[in-house]
Every structure is written in structure tokens, then in C-alpha cells.
């Protein structure tokens, strides 16, 4: 699946459920959730935001993308107050989404940062906290050799070729 296909599948499903143009559609780079739907008010104006993570969509199946988009559409139809309760589950079933609160997604992009200690232990992190970072086994032995974190470059490659909405 490529970015164009991700966009088209999402737009087609929103149109099918009469939400296209009624929600603000965003394609982001979240790495922990494939989709989200938020509704509320900003400066007294109702806001409905539907977001799909391009980073996760590109490493997951079309089936997973469709199920996630339908999951979020069910939230838009049932209303935020329905949560993942009976009303939302009923809507999810009716539109063809798996009526579960959590995704079954197993694929994630490579974490943004990697480090390897001199002892051979390797680490991967999505975000780096401020301050020095040490290998826990070595630190517990009294060694204080700081880990050197390397930013992985393959993550940003898809962001440079964005297709206009």
C-alpha cells in the first residue's frame, strides 16, 4: 500500500458513511495509534478531527487500515460519549468494523532511535528523555559509559513525498 492508496481508502470510507467534508481529515505521523477521532469545541465552534497515521498505515495491511478507519467512523456516528460501550459496538458491527476497543495491529515502523552498548546490549526508543542514558545492566555493575543514540533515517522518507490533499 502506498500513500495515495491510504488516502483514497480513507476518503472513500468517509464518503460512504456521509462524513467526508463534515470532519477535518488529517494524515499524521503518529507511531502508537493508526487512527483517531476527536470531537469538541474550539473557541465555541464545534470541531471534529479524523486522523490517520501515515507512518503506521504504510506498514500495516489494507484490511487493518479499513478496520481502523471504520472503528473511528463508528465513534463519529455513535458520538464520543458512547466510548466503546454498547451503542458504539452496535454501530461498529453495523458498518463492518471489529467492535473492540484495541487494535490487533502488529506492525510498527522502526523506532526513531537506536543505541548499542559496548557490552553488546542494544536499545530502541521512540523518544529520548533529557539527560544521559546508560545501559541498565552495565550501570548496575557500576559502569557509567553513556549510550550514543543514533536517529534512524528511514522514518522520514515517506514524509518528504506527501501528496496534497
Image (spheres, rainbow, N blue to C red):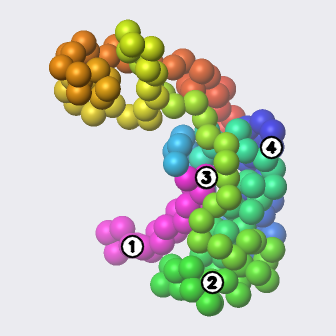
Residue of label 4: 5
Q: Nearer the viewer, mark 4 or mark 2?
A: 2
| Residue at horizontal 67 percent and vertical 52 percent from the top | 105
Q: Nearer the viewer, mark 1 or mark 4?
A: 4
The answer to the question of whether label 3 and label 2 lie on touching residues, with beta carbons closer than 8 A, is no
Give the vertical position of 21 relative to 133 (above or below). below
**Is residue 18 in view from this perspective?**
no
Q: Quadrant of the C terminus?
A: top right
The single residue placed furthest to the front in the displayed view is: 141
| Residue at horizontal 20 percent and vertical 16 percent from the top | 144
Q: Residue 63, how many percent across, how many down?
A: 81, 55
Query: Sequence order check: which comes first, mark 2 or mark 1?
Result: 1
Residue of label 2: 88
Tag 4 secondary structure? helix
Identify the magenta region. 33-51
Residue of label 1: 41
Disc 4 to disc 2, how far (Cα)? Answer: 27 Å
Disc 1 to disc 3, how far (Cα)? Answer: 23 Å
Is residue 4 part of the magenta span, yes or no?
no
The answer to the question of whether label 1 and label 3 lie on touching residues, with beta carbons closer than 8 A, is no
Disc 3 to disc 2, how far (Cα)? Answer: 19 Å
The answer to the question of whether label 4 and label 2 lie on touching residues, with beta carbons closer than 8 A, is no
Quadrant of res 13: bottom right
Query: Sequence order check: which comes first, mark 4 or mark 2?
Result: 4
Residue of label 3: 34
Disc 2 to disc 1, how far (Cα)? Answer: 21 Å
Amino acid at each position: 500500500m502506498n500513500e495515495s492508496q491510504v488516502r483514497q481508502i480513507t476518503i472513500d470510507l468517509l464518503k460512504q458513511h456521509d462524513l467526508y467534508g463534515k470532519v477535518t481529515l488529517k494524515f499524521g505521523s503518529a507511531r502508537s495509534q493508526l487512527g483517531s477521532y476527536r470531537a469538541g469545541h474550539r473557541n465555541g465552534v464545534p470541531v471534529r478531527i479524523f486522523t490517520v497515521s501515515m507512518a503506521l498505515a504504510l506498514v500495516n495491511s489494507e484490511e487493518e487500515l479499513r478496520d481502523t478507519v471504520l472503528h473511528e467512523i463508528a465513534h463519529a456516528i455513535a458520538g464520543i460519549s458512547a466510548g466503546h460501550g454498547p451503542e458504539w459496538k452496535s454501530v461498529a458491527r453495523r458498518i463492518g468494523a471489529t467492535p473492540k476497543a484495541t487494535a490487533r495491529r502488529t506492525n510498527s515502523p522502526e523506532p526513531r532511535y537506536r543505541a548499542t552498548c559496548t557490552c553488546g546490549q542494544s536499545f530502541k526508543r521512540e523518544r529520548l528523555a533529557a539527560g544521559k542514558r546508560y545501559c541498565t545492566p552495565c550501570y548496575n555493575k557500576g559502569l557509567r559509559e553513556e549510550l550514543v543514540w543514533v536517529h534512524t533515517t528511514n522514518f522520514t522518507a515517506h514524509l518528504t513525498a506527501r501528496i496534497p490533499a
